[in-house]
Amino acid sequence: MAAWPGRHVAAAVLVGLAQVSCSSDSYLTTASISPTASASATTTRLSRPTVPTQEATAVPSASFGAFTNGIWDSAKAQGVSRRTFDRAFAGLTPDPKVIALTKKQSEFVKPVWEYLGSAVSEQRLERGGRAVTESAATLTKVEAAYGVDRRVVAGVWGMETNFGSYMGSSDVIRSLATLAHAGYRGDFFRGELVTALVILEQGHIDRDGMVGSWAGAMGQTQFMPTSFMAYAVDFTGDGRRDIWTSTPDALASTANYLKKHGWETGLTWGFEVKVPKGLTYGAGQQSFAAWSQAGVRRMDGRAMPARGEARILMPAGARGPAFLVTKNFDVIKRYNNSDAYALGVAHLGDRLYGGAPIQAPWPTDDLPLDRMQSVELQKHLAAHGFDVGEPDGKLGSQTRAAIASYQERVGLPADGYPSVTLLERLRRSGNGRAT
């Protein structure tokens, strides 16, 4: 996947992303975005595109052939043999389905409660229960080797491919070549294509077995080729890093990825909490002891951890469930820069190991905004004198801070949550007249 626009962390607005793209055509791919960052990449790099920001253009096969032939020098420089190269591209044509998917835009968003309902469905819990039982010894060894909570590793496995049951059906070389030739996301997919050839040359998977998502994410936990090269491991010791058919290799590679991106051993990702009325939502990162002193209590009744810091996450605003989340929650977001995704991974992993469902009710009467409504919201906020930048429908930290400031001005809980109810209030208020 390309380097998608990065993490926007609001210093004063500690709420979660309550909108999740529904551009995918299956519940698996709406939940799943795999890691793509190379070892030197920044935290803004994500993986599988769910709401593309540019479109690829269909191209004639002759031009495509000339393009793939032009890859040879780059591949040769990376140690790819002519035999591997020729076999990879033999008879290859552009994939029109891939081109079509880059044009597929999301007009609606899925509320976080619906997203989590799919992420932690009874069917997924049933399949996951069998999977973690069958791989219990592997998960224990992986946790011991990398210090990453087995529940989170299992959660990623479940979110990405439903525990290895669906890893995608696209020819990875064909998909990457199609995207690279179309110039989609600049040179990103060209680099992924060359790296995929290196993976074939090294014998980690054969040509026919290199299948994955339409954008080139591969294996049981969906790595892009550059992430494979940087983070995949041979946990079985057979000389191959096989994230496709070897569950131990796939799970250990995921743990290695999370560890290399800052996972702190022994620190929870977080948990659901009860928040007292009048809590300042912009309190920021504080110790668990400080949250306890402020009246925040764990929903399960247990004591706060003795060490560590956390922040408040309210993925559906002040009327919905609240969580205390730590730096390890942000590490999960390196797979997909979405609070909803990370919460899905974490909650799924907890449920697989006996954790309780989310206890507080969701505000199902207060829907998140679609793109057009988000643009309208930004325009109203700008009319009230708040700086939201260019109204583009992207509700990042600047817009959420503006929402929180507006809410504070009119006496609402300043949670920064962009909802239909808030938009309707802004519509009634006119240009700067709070109601």
Image (cartoon, rainbow, N blue to C red):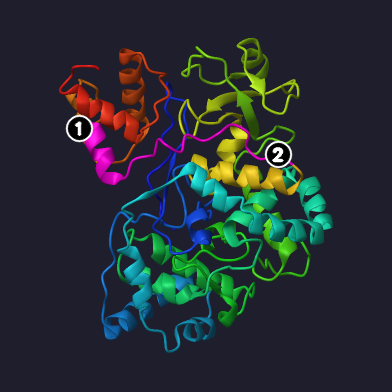
Q: Is residue 370 magenta?
A: yes
Q: Which mark is residue 379?
A: 1
Q: Residue at x 66, y 40 (%)?
A: 357
What is the span of residues highlighted in magenta in the rendered image? Answer: 355-378
Which quadrant holds the C terminus? top left
Classify mark 2: residues with Cα within 10 Å, few (<14), some (14-19) or many (20+).
few
Q: Residue furthest bottom?
A: 91
Q: Is residue 427 left or right of residue 130?
A: left
- N-terminal of the two: label 1 or label 2? 2
The residue nearer to you, when weighing 126 against 10, is: 126
Q: CA distance from mark 1 to mark 2?
A: 41 Å
**In the depicted structure, whether residue 29 falls above or below residue 433:** below
Image spot of residue 347 (x, y percent): 64, 43
Q: Is residue 230 left or right of residue 105?
A: right
Secondary structure character of the magenta stretch overall: loop
Q: Residue furthest right?
A: 137
Could you tell me the amino acid type at mark 1?
Lys
Q: Residue at x 43, y 60 (%)?
A: 24
Could you tell me the amino acid type at mark 2?
Ala
Image spot of residue 102 (x, y percent): 33, 64
Q: Which mark is residue 356?
A: 2
**In the depicted structure, whether residue 423 falls above or below residue 41:** above
Corner quadrant of residue 410: top left
Q: Is residue 334 visible?
A: no
Q: Residue at x 47, y 55 (%)?
A: 47
